Amino acid sequence: AGNYEVTGIPPLIMSTHLLVPLHVKYIQGLGESKDDLAYHLTAHLRLNAIYWGLTALSIVNHQDALDRDEMIEFVMSCWDEEAGAFGAHPNHDAHILATLSAIQILVMQDALDRLDVPKVVKFILSLQQPSGVFAGDSFGEIDTRFSYCAVSALSLLGRLHELDIEKTTNYIIQCRNFDGGFGSCVGAESHAGQVWVCVAALAIMDRLDVVDVPTLAWWLAERQLPSGGLNGRPEKLPDVCYSHWALSSLAILKKLSWIDADRTISFILSAQDSEGGGIADRAGDMVDVFHTVFGIAGLSLLGYPDLLDLDPVYCMPAATIEKMGLRKDWQA
Ligand SMILES: CN(C(=O)[C@H](Cc1cnc[nH]1)NC(=O)OCc1ccccc1)[C@@H](Cc1ccccc1)C(=O)N[C@@H](Cc1c[nH]c2ccccc12)C(=O)NO
Ligand SMILES: [Zn+2]
């Protein structure tokens, strides 16, 4: 029995196909598991997880598998009126990460009319530090991830002109390392995730001129291992999510051809759970919605059949970004 009926694909060739019906069922099931501990231990990521689930469903063209009104109501229940921004869960403190996820969800659900745009723009701009980097919230933790959140959110709201682009770019320039990569702050080592947030932010600000493209593209291509998977830093294990961060960065730099696509595709497909659906960081590990979206996103970037295009800068469906006039001429 099991999933043979669901997918209609004989078990022996499970890992050579993306098991779309199973992944849709897995994502739909996430909201129902309120009784197990994992659900409550991840409350601080809830809004991010909804963005991850919605993006995964959109790329496999099943966006309507989750209830739109229920999702919008939950997003708005995370609005912190006093701060003028979103927390990751109702009654959690406002944070720029949750605020970006909320904006991404509202954009994808065509529900930006629910948002007090001037208030949220004020929150975002208030987080820029004298150095040019952004803090994540009023407690002041800084990270180039938060600079990305600010640039991406303002761009999605059509308010990028309110950002001091020179000041924001100057901080990212100081985070450049000798390997062409970027870290989380000045002096931090290069990491595929941080490379993506810095390169994507620079792309939105039209400042890719500050990137040493040949050196960085080489460092990114070096992330690919014999298994086909990519790691986040030298000597680390390959991981589906880092495949996405490195691949998106290469797509922005127009160097995706430097990767052996077929081997990465088989690495991602091998991380699927052919019983319950979902994708893990690598074959044999527990699946989660985070690696599910970044596995599907990686397949889309690599041209796996029957998937909608992903925009590598916003990590959202390309059609959505196109419709907002924010799409650059990326090589898919
Ligand atoms: C907090 N997170 C992480 O630290 C993960 C943990 C991990 C997953 N696989 C190996 N480790 N690491 C991670 O996301 O690293 C990639 C990264 C790091 C920095 C910047 C961008 C991407 C994950 C959640 C998580 C925790 C534990 C296990 C699986 C997922 C996470 O939320 N990552 C963030 C990182 C990130 C991606 N894009 C961003 C844009 C702005 C800010 C942050 C992010 C995220 O994806 N937000 O949408
Ligand atoms: Zn991972």
Image (cartoon, rainbow, N blue to C red):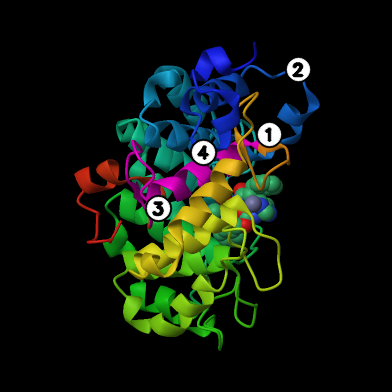
Out of 207 and 271, give the one closest to the viewer: 271
**Going 76% across and 34% down the picture, which residue do you hit?**
41
Q: Position of residue 106 (x, y in %)?
A: 38, 35
Give yes or no for residue 294 being in the magenta stretch.
yes
Instruction: Tell me: 87 left or right of 150.
Output: right
Label 2 or label 1, whichever comes before in sequence order: 2
Residue 188 location, x and y as percent?
A: 65, 78
Q: Earlier in the sequence, mark 1 or mark 3?
A: 1
Mark linked to residue 302: 3
> Where is mark 4, residue-wise?
16
Q: Nearer the viewer, residue 320 or 143?
A: 320
Q: Earlier in the sequence, mark 1 or mark 4?
A: 4
Beta carbon of the mark 3 residue lies under 8 A of ligand 2: no
Q: Which mark is residue 43?
A: 1
Farthest residue to the right: give it: 37
Identity of the amino acid at label 3?
Leu
Residue 108 appears in view? yes
Closest to the camera, between mark 3 and mark 4, is 4
Q: CA distance from mark 3 to mark 4?
A: 15 Å
Q: Which residue is mark 2?
A: 35
- Read off the magenta span: 288-312
- Tell which circle, 2 or 3, labels the residue nearer the N-terminal end: 2
Look at label 4 and name its amino acid. Thr
Q: Nearer the viewer, residue 251 or 198?
A: 251
As rendered, which of 234 and 197 lies closer to the eye?
234
Classify mark 1: residues with Cα within 10 Å, few (<14), some (14-19) or many (20+): some
Asked if the beta carbon under badge 4 is closer than 8 A to the nearest atom of ligand 2, the reply is no
